[in-house]
Amino acid sequence: MYIDKNKLRYTIAAFLLSLLILMGGQLLFSKFVAYRPLLKTFSQKEYVDQVNIKKETGRVIIEIYLKDVDNLQETYGDIYNTAFGLLKGRPFAIKILNKPDEYLENIYNQEVQFIVYEGIKTGEFFQMRSHLDQLEAKYKIDIAVFLDDENLYLKIKNDRSVFYKIIKRS
């Protein structure tokens, strides 16, 4: 049986071009139709500095940079409920991202994280708060901690920057 090489090339080229167009259409649909309500809604929230939407392994990743908020737990709850309502059952994850200064990051990495994880592990939250109060006085910073059944919400602030961290309790 004789196969015409030119027809085979045209067939393969047409297949690849069709595949490229379909993938591009899917990307455009995801970016401009499916995720536009998320971007628009979160961009209008007064506590949001910047928002990015990505899709990874079958779920939507919502990356949010926050402005200075008073209650991180309430803010996270609002973000979660908003995303849940807009995504209508599709799986998603929320990432609260930071741009803290190096000073706050070092305080967290060298001292605060150990106190917080020990508090979560032992359940001694009054003792944890006492240690955090000592760090506040030592470094002249503000440390706010909020708890719920799932997470510990940590905010460290000085006059130049804010550091946020959400830590699973289980």
Image (cartoon, rainbow, N blue to C red):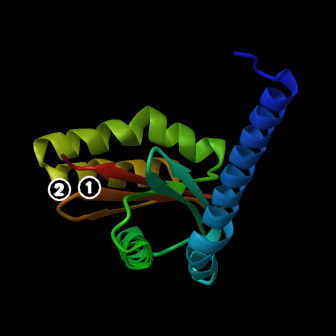
Residue 76: percent from left, percent from top? 40, 69
The amino acid beneath tag 2 is Phe
Residue 131: percent from left, percent from top? 29, 47
Q: Farthest residue in the left direction? A: 123
Q: Farthest residue in the top direction? A: 1
Q: Is residue 33 in view?
A: yes
Q: Tell me the residue at 22%/58% (across/down).
A: 150
The amino acid beneath tag 1 is Arg
Q: Tell me the residue at 69%/45% (across/down).
A: 19
Q: Quadrant of the N terminus?
A: top right
Q: Which mark is residue 142?
A: none
Q: Tell me the residue at 44%/50% (across/down).
A: 58
The 10 Å Cα crowd at callout 2, few under 14, some 14 to 19, many 20 or more, is few
Residue 78: percent from left, percent from top? 40, 78
Q: Is residue 16 left or right of residue 94?
A: right
Q: Quadrant of residue 155?
A: bottom left
**What SS does tag 2 mark?**
helix
Number of numbered tags placed on the structure image: 2
Q: Which mark is residue 126?
A: 2
Is there a contact, CB below 8 Å, between mark 2 and mark 1?
Answer: yes
Q: Which is more toward the observer, 70 or 45? A: 45
Q: Is residue 44 left or right of residue 151?
A: right
Q: Which is more toward the observer, 89 or 154? A: 89
Residue identified by numbered label 1: 129
